[in-house]
Image (cartoon, rainbow, N blue to C red):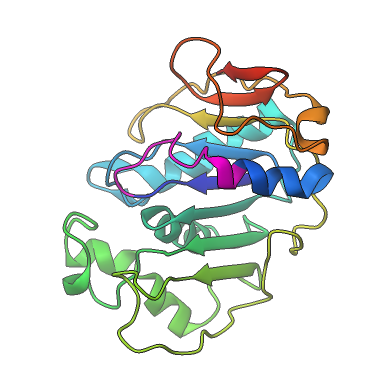
Amino acid sequence: MLVFLHGKGEDQDSNLDDAMFAALARLGSRAPDVVFPYGGADSYWHDRAGGAWGSFVVNEVIAQALSRLHADPKRVAIGGISMGGFGALDIARVHPGRFCAVGAHSAALWVSGGESAPGAFDDAQDFARHDVIAAARAGDPYRGAAVWIDVGTDDPSAPPTPHSPRRCGPTVTLSSSTCGPGHTTRAIGRATGTATSSSTLPPLPTATRADQESGSARMPPRRCGASGGRAMHGECDEVL
């Protein structure tokens, strides 16, 4: 199962696009279940004054998704884009051994609190508690889990001088990782609620195997009812 965290200003539906559906379709029976939680406009996915967002992901989203999807708790990966990339690295750092792989696409990372985006952290102390770069410099905070980090040359969070990345464990790719072989994607859904109070996840219906194994998932997804999360299923996308 993959927990995918969205970027700043996005929501649980932002990454339900052609690229995501095509990548899952290419993996066929090896594709993971993917859960898209909602993390607010600018929470940066960590426990802070405005909400316990990191704890929300681990204690509520993952716990309920595992129960609904019957996924293997030993094969849970976490990843995200931009703000979500930072969140994935930070949550996995705070919970070492919880995830078999960590991925960060164009992660929002800074070497000091003064360089961080406005609102990313409450204050200098909040930054220090969630300084993933300092944690990596001190050792391997992920205890050997596969870690993937990429960044574009025009990304505002990229370092000014190109440099060769350092590996913090075995590289993970879409087709192979230390999580082992995957299984058919049954649902693409979302977790709703807030980070400050207990929330109830909507049910995650089971999608047909043919959707992924035949690569016939609709792109972009079509809604079949009221606004909400989606599960790829049959001729249209069930609203969760």
- The residue that appears at 31% across and 49% down in the rendered structure is 8
Query: Is residue 1 in sight in this rendering?
Result: no
Please identify the residue farthest to the top as the structure is shown: 225
- The residue that appears at 48% across and 62% down in the rendered structure is 105
Q: Nearer the viewer, residue 72 or 84?
A: 84
- The residue that appears at 75% across and 64% down in the rendered structure is 178
Residue 202 x %, y %: 53, 19
Is residue 23 rendered magenta in the image? no
Q: Is residue 111 left or right of residue 202?
A: left
Q: Quadrant of the C terminus?
A: top right
Determine whether 17 is above or below 178 in the image.
above
Q: Is residue 214 left or right of residue 79?
A: right
Determine whether 227 is above or below 218 in the image.
above
Q: Is residue 105 left or right of residue 160?
A: right
Q: Nearer the viewer, residue 11 or 234?
A: 234
User: Bounds of the magenta span?
Assistant: 8-20
Quadrant assignment, res 70 = top right
Quadrant assignment, res 180 = bottom right
Residue 126 x %, y %: 25, 61
Residue 236 x %, y %: 64, 18
Is residue 14 rendered magenta in the image? yes
Residue 52 x %, y %: 35, 43
Query: Is residue 87 in sight in this rendering?
Result: yes
Q: What secondary structure do most residues of the magenta stretch adopt?
A: loop
- The residue that appears at 75% across and 60% down in the rendered structure is 175
Number of marks present in the image shown: 0
Q: Quadrant of the N terminus?
A: top right
Determine whether 182 is above or below 156 in the image.
above
Quadrant assignment, res 199 = top left
